Image (cartoon, rainbow, N blue to C red):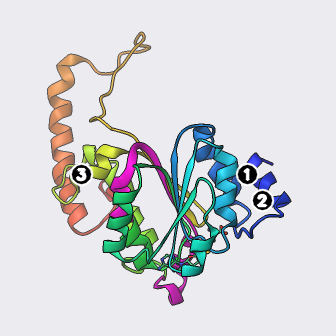
């Protein structure tokens, strides 16, 4: 059991409300930040217990900020814990919060969990997360719950929205104008999916380059065949363009 889960299990302080399997996910992505001078933001304060948990886990140099729509949460402020009252789907409010806090190392969205709330918060706050920071959105099971605006493959659920990130981080290799290098391509190192959780680790990315080292084990790509290989690749591309138009998989061409 990691320190975070231990704290949770032994907690006698303010109430914390978390799914059991989140502690491994948190520790995996957050442990490198412990003891450092960092800024942590959690959307969704509830009874204030998780903010206290972050304070303990990250240590005395961490500044913890909470965001909640419930004005009662303001009373839960304490040393190194500051709370902003407003809605995570209110862009103006979030822009105001950004002016009042440093760039964020870790952002956890555990707020109202509707699609609009999660998407607006991401759109407004992602650029305020540091170049090497982490953005974590949890309770994504609501992307499958009709009452929250979810539904399997329904447009604009947070899960569907986040699937674009998978394309975005691969956009360097796109041969189609529908997928271009964008800010996510250049600023996200990895996207991690867990049950109910998506984690994005930021990091400045350059166009990937490939290299080869070591000795050749057998004759594989004779230079004289290069022109033929280029022709085959070109004809394959043309065939795949047609197959792609009909949304047919590549395997049909074999
Ligand atoms: C699941 S609870 C947070 C639990 C807390 N992080 C914990 O681990 O104990 C969700 C919180 O989100 C807040 N909330 C709901 N809608 C919101 C909104 N539109 N903007 C900000 N907070 C919201 C609720 O008031 C509630 O306190």
Number of residues whose C-alpha sits closer than 10 Å to that of mark 2, classed few (under 14), some (14–19) or many (20 or more): some
Which residue in the structure is indicated by mark 1? 4
Residue 145 is a magenta residue: yes
Looking at this view, is 219 or 55 the one in front? Answer: 55
Q: CA distance from mark 1 to mark 3?
A: 35 Å
Which residue in the structure is indicated by mark 2? 8
Which residue in the structure is indicated by mark 3? 182
Say which residue appears at 54% left-offset and 71% top-offset.
140
Image spot of residue 195 (x, y percent): 61, 64
Q: Magenta stretch?
A: 122-150
Q: Which residue appears farthest toward the top when viewing the image? A: 215
Can you see residue 254? no
Say which residue appears at 31% left-offset and 33% top-offset.
208
Residues marked 1 and 2 touching at CB (< 8 Å): yes
Image spot of residue 243 (x, y percent): 24, 62
Instruction: Specify the quadrant of the image occupied by residue 154.
Output: bottom left
Left or right placement of residue 29 versus residue 155 in this view: right
Q: Is mark 3 within 8 Å of ligand 1?
A: no
Q: CA distance from mark 3 to mark 2?
A: 39 Å
Secondary-structure class at tag 2? helix
Image spot of residue 142 (x, y percent): 54, 78
């Amino acid at each position: 059991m990691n320190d975070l889960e231990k704290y949770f299990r032994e907690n006698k302080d303010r109430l914390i409300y978390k799914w059991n399997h989140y502690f491994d996910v948190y520790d995996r992505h957050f442990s490198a930040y412990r003891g450092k001078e960092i800024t942590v933001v959690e959307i969704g304060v509830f009874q204030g217990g998780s903010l206290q948990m972050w304070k303990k886990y990250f240590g005395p140099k961490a500044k913890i900020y909470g965001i909640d729509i419930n004005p009662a949460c303001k009373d839960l402020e304490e040393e190194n814990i500051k709370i902003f009252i407003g809605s995570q789907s209110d862009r103006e409010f979030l822009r105001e919060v950004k002016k009042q806090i440093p760039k964020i190392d870790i952002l956890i969205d555990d707020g109202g969990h509707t699609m609009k709330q999660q998407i607006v918060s991401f759109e407004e706050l992602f650029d305020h997360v540091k170049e090497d920071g982490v953005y974590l959105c949890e309770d994504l099971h609501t992307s499958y719950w009709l009452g929250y605006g979810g539904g399997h493959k329904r447009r604009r659920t947070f899960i569907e929205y986040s699937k674009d990130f998978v394309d975005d981080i691969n956009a360097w290799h796109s041969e189609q104008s529908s997928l271009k290098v964008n800010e996510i391509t250049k600023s996200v190192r990895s996207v991690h999916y867990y049950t109910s959780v998506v984690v994005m680790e930021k990091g400045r990315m350059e166009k990937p380059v490939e290299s080869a080292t070591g000795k050749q084990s057998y004759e594989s790509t004779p230079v004289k065949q290069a022109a033929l290989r280029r022709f085959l690749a070109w004809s394959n591309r043309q065939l795949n363009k047609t197959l792609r138009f009909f949304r047919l998989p590549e395997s049909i061409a074999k």
